[in-house]
């Protein structure tokens, strides 16, 4: 259970999603060159495929503490016809930026560690594309913004790459859903009159909602909680639809359905063995 109450201020100008495609990840104008990827979980695969497919971009390094994951991603590069690349440990990150002449860093590690890689990259003059959310706490966000503001020619965002100064810190990909675009047009054209109040609900069933409690997201210290990790999409949609940004925000919530305590209380709990990377890697080799 969680909620959010926002008080909005005067409208601000926001571009239509149709006018920002040249700044989306993977475009030759803004996203290209020598790319390093931090974190080789499942999310990184999307970026690897996209980068390899663009002639102006090359994956030049991985930063990953798990050698098995890193090996798998080098195998993926080879299967796509791209050369394998060096793998650096987290404590070798700054060395990697210099030694591999990195131009763009793609960050796909757990949310709570984003700042650890964003700030050194900006300090080194490297552009950053980070998975949303940009980070998980106010203090971390301030440190990132302070660093970025000292290098206004650089850019950083979550899931949308913007050339120039920091422009977007919220995931905008939900704007490209045809239904969401229709809502935007309907409101912008005044078909429902002036919007005075918004009641927004996004309901996750157990098919998708449970995913967050099977992996690292379930620890609030890793993800900041679902209002940080997941709801960035929803905050951005409302802001975009009504052309306004919140002046004040108040939130509330609790872990009412998921979690061991609630599960055992209501009889929903089910113990299970979690797969480990090594066994999964060996099993994949056996299948081959």
Image: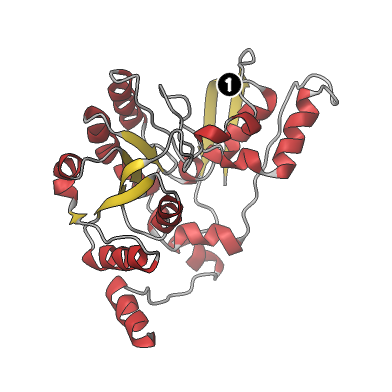
- Residue 22, percent across and down? 54, 33
Position of residue 125 in the picture relative to residue 128 (left or right): left
Using the image as rendered, state which of residue 252 and residue 185 is in the foreground: 185
Residue at 43% across, 40% down: 133
- Residue 158, percent across and down? 45, 38
Position of residue 128 in the picture relative to residue 255 (left or right): left
Quadrant hosting residue 179: top right
Quadrant hosting residue 69: bottom left
Label 1's element?
Answer: loop
Residue found farthest to the front: 55
Residue at 58% across, 33% down: 236
Using the image as rendered, state which of residue 202 and residue 108 is in the foreground: 108
Q: Is residue 136 visible?
A: no
Residue found farthest to the right: 191
Residue found farthest to the top: 10
Using the image as rendered, state which of residue 97 and residue 263 is in the foreground: 97
Residue at 35% across, 21% down: 153
What residue is shown with label 1? 245
Quadrant hosting residue 139: top left
Q: In this view, does 211 lie above or below 271?
A: above
Residue at 21% across, 58% down: 65
């Amino acid at each position: 259970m969680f909620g959010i109450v926002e008080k909005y201020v005067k409208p601000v100008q926001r571009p239509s999603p149709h006018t920002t495609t040249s700044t989306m990840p993977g475009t030759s104008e803004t996203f290209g060159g020598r790319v390093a990827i931090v974190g080789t979980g499942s999310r990184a695969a999307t970026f690897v495929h996209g980068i390899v497919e663009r002639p102006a971009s090359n994956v030049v390094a991985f930063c990953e503490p798990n050698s098995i994951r890193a090996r798998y991603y080098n195998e993926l590069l080879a299967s796509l016809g791209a050369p394998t690349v060096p793998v650096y440990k987290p404590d070798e990150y700054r060395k990697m930026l210099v030694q591999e002449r990195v131009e763009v860093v793609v960050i796909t590690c757990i949310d709570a560690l984003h700042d650890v890689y964003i700030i050194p990259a900006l300090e080194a003059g490297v552009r950053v594309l980070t998975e949303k959310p940009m980070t998980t706490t106010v203090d971390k966000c301030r440190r990132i913004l302070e660093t970025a503001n000292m290098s206004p020619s650089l850019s950083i965002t979550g899931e949308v790459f913007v050339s120039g100064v920091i422009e977007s810190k919220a995931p905008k990909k939900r704007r490209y859903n045809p239904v969401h675009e229709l809502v935007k047009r309907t409101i912008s054209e005044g078909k429902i009159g002036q919007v005075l109040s918004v009641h927004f609900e996004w309901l996750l069933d157990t098919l998708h909602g449970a995913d967050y409690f099977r992996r690292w997201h379930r620890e609030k210290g890793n993800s900041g909680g679902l209002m940080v990790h997941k709801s960035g999409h929803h905050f951005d949609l409302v802001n975009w639809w009504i052309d306004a940004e919140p002046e004040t925000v108040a939130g509330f919530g609790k872990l009412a359905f998921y979690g061991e305590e609630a599960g055992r209380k209501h009889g929903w709990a089910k113990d299970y063995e979690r797969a480990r990377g090594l066994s999964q890697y060996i099993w994949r080799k056996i299948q081959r």
